[in-house]
């Protein structure tokens, strides 16, 4: 395995986006195509949900399978190297996600998490989104 320098690793990590990711853009396009309108990344809500439907009191998070550790997906596995770094980092993401979801629900919001891998099944995802969001 080729090892890269600390500076190169740092440069790679800086390129990872927290919003406007490919899965999020695909989800936004799908939901917009279904006729729903939404707000993006409301800073006044816990976790800054990716999509916010204020009139419906519903929010959607588009989670990357790796970064949020999707247990039902191959991509949600922990890397085999540098466990002392990755395990706490990824676990903190999971703890933060759960806390934000609990706070949102306590404030009266309904929360839906869409995993990156779920975007491959547009038909079943469309049905799930319509069921969550309700009629137009």
Image (tube, grey):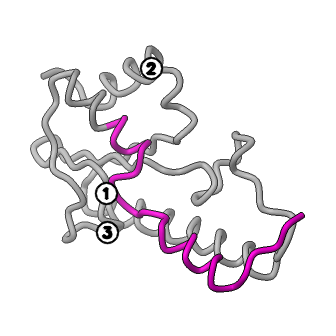
- In this rendering, which labeled residue sits more in front, label 2 or label 3? 2
Q: Nearer the viewer, residue 51 or 17?
A: 17
Measured from the top left, where is residue 103 in percent x and y? Answer: 36, 67
Q: How many marks?
A: 3
- In this picture, residue 23 sits left or right of residue 134: right
Instruction: Identify the disc placed on residue 46.
Output: 3
Q: Nearer the viewer, residue 132 or 37?
A: 37
- What residue is at 70 percent from the left and 78 percent from the top? 88
Dot 2: what SS? helix
Quadrant of residue 45 within the rendered picture: bottom left
Instruction: Identify the disc placed on residue 130.
Output: none
Tell me which label, 2 or 1, sits earlier in the chain. 1
- What residue is at 57 percent from the left and 36 percent from the top? 117
- What whole-number distance in Å separates the C-alpha atoms at marks 2 and 1? 21 Å
Q: Quadrant of the N terminus?
A: bottom right
Measured from the top left, where is residue 96 in percent x and y? Answer: 50, 71
- Which residue is identified by label 1? 49
Q: Is residue 49 above or below residue 125?
A: below
Q: Quadrant of the C terminus?
A: top left
- What whole-number distance in Å separates the C-alpha atoms at marks 2 and 3? 28 Å
- In this rendering, which labeled residue sits more in front, label 2 or label 1? 2
Q: Does the magenta stretch include residue 18?
A: yes
Circles 2 and 3 in contact, beta carbons < 8 Å: no
Q: What stretch is highlighted in magenta?
A: 1-27
- What residue is at 30 percent from the left and 64 percent from the top? 48
Q: Is residue 26 above or below residue 48?
A: above
Q: Nearer the viewer, residue 27 or 7?
A: 7
């Amino acid at each position: 395995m080729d090892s890269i320098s600390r500076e190169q690793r740092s440069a790679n990590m800086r390129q990872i986006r927290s919003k406007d990711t490919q899965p999020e853009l695909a989800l936004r396009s799908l939901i917009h195509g279904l006729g729903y309108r939404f707000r993006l990344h409301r800073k006044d809500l816990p976790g800054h949900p990716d999509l916010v439907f204020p009139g419906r009191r519903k929010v959607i998070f588009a989670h990357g399978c790796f970064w949020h550790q999707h247990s039902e997906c191959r991509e949600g596995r922990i890397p085999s190297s540098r466990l002392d770094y990755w395990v706490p980092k990824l676990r903190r993401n999971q703890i933060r996600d759960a806390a934000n979801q609990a706070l949102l629900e306590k404030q009266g919001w309904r929360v839906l998490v869409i995993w990156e891998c779920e975007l491959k099944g547009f038909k079943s995802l469309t049905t799930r989104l319509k069921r969550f969001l309700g009629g137009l």
